[in-house]
Amino acid sequence: MRFAALAAGALLAGAAMGAPTAHYDIAVRIDPATRALAAEATLRVPPAAETVTLGARFAVERILLDGQALAASPVERGADRVYVLPPASGARTLALRWHGTLASLDRSLDHRRTLGHAAPVAGTEGTFLPSASAWYPVLRGRDGPLLASYRAALDLPASQRGLVPGRLVEAGEVAGRYRATFEFLRPAEGIDLMAGPYRVQTRTVRGRTGSAVALRTYFHAGIDGLAPAYLDAIEGYLDLYETWIGPYPFTEFSIVSSPTPTGFGMPTLAYLGERVLALPFIRATSLGHEVLHNWWGNGVYPDWASGNWSEGLTTFMADYAYKERESAAAAREMRLAWLRDLAAVPPGADRPLAAFTARTHGTSQIVGYHKAAMLFLMLRDDIGAAAFDAGIRRFWTEHRFRVASWQDLRGAFEAASGRSLAGFFAQWLERPGLPAVRIAHAERRAAGDGHAVRLMLEQDAPAFALRVPLRVRSAAGDETHVLKLHETRQTFEVPAGARPLALALDPDFHVLRRLAEAEAPPILRQAMVAPRAAVAVLGAGAAWRDAAERLAGRMFDAAPRELAPGAAPPSDAALLAIGPHEAIDGWLAAHGLPPRPPALGERSDAQAWAAARVGGAPLAVVAARDPAALETVARLLPHYGRQSFVVFETGRVAERGVWTGRPVAWQLE
Ligand SMILES: [Zn+2]
């Protein structure tokens, strides 16, 4: 999930060198029922500040720079009002007082729209004021908002609780109001404020160094019963990551329930949808990921210009680590799913890892999270877990609360392993695309009294340097050898315990590579992420057309083009065919496309499946009984991109799965 983005690394470096830094001291009163906000603030303004921005929805009662009214009038820019500050060589003080009405909470926003929705919203069920909405006067320099420390005093009706990231200094009810003061003394990118009719549960735990960490849940009443289980889970994650990386860098961690289905990680807290929090698996997955972002992302900041390493490292040390703890099979399944997703990325859309800077759309998320997580897996396979963990701890100690790049990570792992990793990082960060490795030839060899196999591995030029596991099957069982491949064609001789029978290349998916076609059976996502897509709608009538349009609109990253009735499907674009069962079967046959897979069995309300076409362009098919069944598909199918087929019955998913893949194998004659 997303964490708050830090904009200006250079300013942090300035902070370390002793230049004055920005600081906000804010007092804000909010009445969610009327959506009224009234606030005042005193700002320490460093010379780097060029402007101050406040949302145009607010009326400014007073703005004083070093006690004098600001002379220049503000400029309206979009939803913001921008005041230009006269240049100065030293720090100044800006005092403001403002008030206004917040937008009303729209509970229908989905996660994607919430991310792009920068308006400050309020309602009795929840208030969310993102820093991007400029609900407070934001100091900006040449490169964006200045990193700043802050102190914020919140004043809410007694029935509400609220917070901003940071340490809770004091809280209580005074004269029928709830008051809480927070401070954040590290450089922060912005201040996000949350409030709601929360029940707050607190547990204070001791970190590994003995310092106290306050864990809190700010939950809506409907899920408050889950609070103890959440506090237990957070405690477990803190212990895991303190042991693995180093002391938790803050004094609190809170989980805050949101009335909209969103997921934001910020320093010291995670803001997750109320309905998301009610899902039983969130504690075992997303929660740990968000806790870990306090080290990676909000503890060490990525250097955006050279690529965002923090999502990949967080995915590797959270989501993937939990699978490893579950079982070897679960971890293998996750690696295969990542590689399958990467195989679904069209070759031209696969950018180098260093170009991944933030989460923008489907493909970049796949590249950024999964490719980087595989990089860390291969690195640990190569230098060993002890050196990997030592590198992680070293990176944390050296870069805590600073901006760090991929090169800084490389430096930490080089120091820990005593090896140059320049080639490894350069190849995976700077090259687009993935290697594809094949067995070109293999034969049995006599090796003294024993047995051996000679084989040739092949990859396209320019060659990647890879450690490729090879499994040799013999009557004595399976043995795995690691082959160091660095040429386009390279011969190896491998001993075997008994007469060798068969070989399998990287059967457990430890190498970041483009899976062979048989290893990567078609999945629905291949069509969804294709740069060009065509849609054939076979159902007649407005109800079919409307449902088909909704499905196509939700399914593709890029806008698809509709095929004219009777037109032949293009061979160079992804193809989605939508229609009634009988029309679909006839249409597939008429155009020489693969028929409905027999495994799908009896026709249900609706079926969707992916198939391989000659030439490789992805094909997805949706066959439905009637437009109502198609509406169900339109609603649910976009969530099932990782499947090869999905069967729908009575408005829900009845069955789904991935066609079975086969490893790259060689049977010895
Ligand atoms: Zn994340």
Image (cartoon, rainbow, N blue to C red):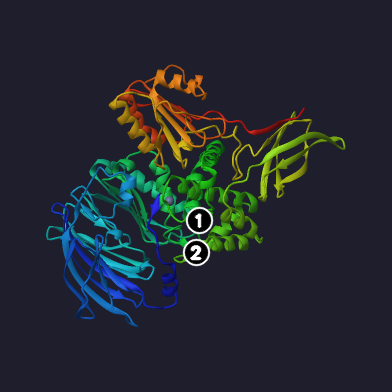
Would you say the beta carbon of the disc 2 residue lies within 8 angstroms of ligand 1? no
Which circle marks residue 520 in the picture?
Answer: none
Please name which of the two marks, 2 or 1, marks the residue nearer to the observer.
1
- Within the image, what quadrant is residue 438 found in? top right
Report whether 308 appears left or right of 383: left
- The location of residue 601, given as percent across then percent down, is 46, 18
- The location of residue 582, given as percent across then percent down, is 41, 18
What's under tag 1, amino acid-wise?
Ala
Residue reaching furthest to the top: 602
Can the viewer see residue 131 in this picture?
yes
Can the viewer see residue 647 in this picture?
no
Find out whether the residues at labels 2 and 1 contact each other: C-beta distance under 8 Å. Answer: no
Residue reaching furthest to the bottom: 89
Earlier residue among tags 2 and 1: 1
- The location of residue 523, given as percent across then percent down, is 49, 33
Which circle marks residue 355 in the picture?
Answer: 1
Q: Nearer the viewer, residue 123 or 348?
A: 348
- Within the image, what quadrant is residue 278 found in? top left
Report whether 622 appears left or right of 27: right
Q: Which residue is mark 2?
A: 404
Report whether 472 appears left or right of 24: right
> Dot 1 surroundings within 10 Å: few (below 14), some, or many (20 or more)?
some
